[in-house]
Amino acid sequence: MDRRIFLKSGLATACLAGVVHGAEENQTPAATGLRTKIAVAPQWFQGSHVEQIEQIAAAGFPAFETLRCGSWEDKESVRKRCEELGVACGAVGGGMGTISDWGPNDPENHPRFVEAVKTGIAQAKAIGSKRVLSLSGPTRQGVSKEEQMEALAKAGRLVAPLLEEAGIVMVWECLNVLVNHPGYFLVYSADGSELVKRTDHPNVKFLYDIYHQQISEGNLINNIKKYIGEIGHFHFADNPGRHEPGTGEINYKNVFRAIYETGFRDIVACEFGKIKSTAEVLAVLAECDRW
């Protein structure tokens, strides 16, 4: 059935109304047998964090992500429930560099960065995450790109042994400067790939955010295939607007298929403000995996 007809028919809402609002366990999930390990946002669901995880599992989704979950007071309870239900936790972020204030692209910030990564690792381990997200900081005026890239590579090498010991991968996030984050340093996937190669450690990768890269450079599928060896995590939203798939120009069915065909089997995380109801969005996400 065509996705638009499916959604308009009300079948999507009927299918997911139970799991979103805590109905009986025999309610049929909309997302069964997903090939893409889609992480959805727990804040789309009601109740405590543990109850949100339970609803995510009941809806048939294999993972959740909200970058601030490492600071949740109940993160150990969340980790335990995730282990019981087989739900994975996406990336943990917060404080490991910033978008516009400070970043490890300045060597003077390296001691601060190392301490922030230590905190991020501890939070990730407590909630069961295998990824921590770091930001490059803003472009330093009057300093060459080469010098800033080398500073980031050095920062990565400083924390690599800590990451390896913890069994956690750090991902540098590339962001667009045309719409959302003017002045940010690390923008293009080629630079993310180059940074990973310079660091030369398996626990340091870069985050390919499909929304940001569509704005910055396009050529999504070719670049995903080209740089998959250096990509450690994915975020996604449609463009323009940064909402759920189907609201913009990106063909997520083809993009998800391309990611799968590279052999990537880790988390591909939602990072958008949804327009439709939770039930409708979950149905749209499940449909993106049906190719």
Image: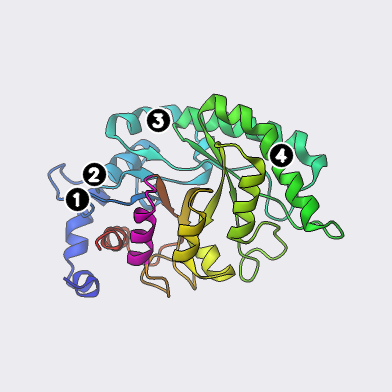
Which residue does the numbered mark 4 point to in the structure image? Answer: 155
Type of the residue with mark 2: Ala
Real-space CA distance between mark 4 and mark 2, rounded to the nearest whole angstrom: 40 Å
Q: Earlier in the sequence, mark 3 or mark 2?
A: 2
**Crowding near the residue tagged with mark 3, few <14, some 14–19, many ≥20 C-alpha atoms within 10 Å:** many
Q: Earlier in the sequence, mark 1 or mark 3?
A: 1
* Residue 74 in sight here: no
Which residue does the numbered mark 2 point to in the structure image? Answer: 58
Q: Are marks 4 and 1 in contact (CB under 8 Å)?
A: no
Type of the residue with mark 3: Arg
Q: Are marks 3 and 2 in contact (CB under 8 Å)?
A: no
Instruction: Give the label on residue 68, or none.
Output: none
| Residue in view at x 32 percent, y 58 percent | 278
Q: Earlier in the sequence, mark 2 or mark 1?
A: 1
* Residue 10 in sight here: yes
| Residue in view at x 34 percent, y 33 percent | 82
Report the span colored magenta.
252-265
Type of the residue with mark 1: Pro
Q: Are marks 4 and 3 in contact (CB under 8 Å)?
A: no
Mark in the foreground, 4 or 3: 4
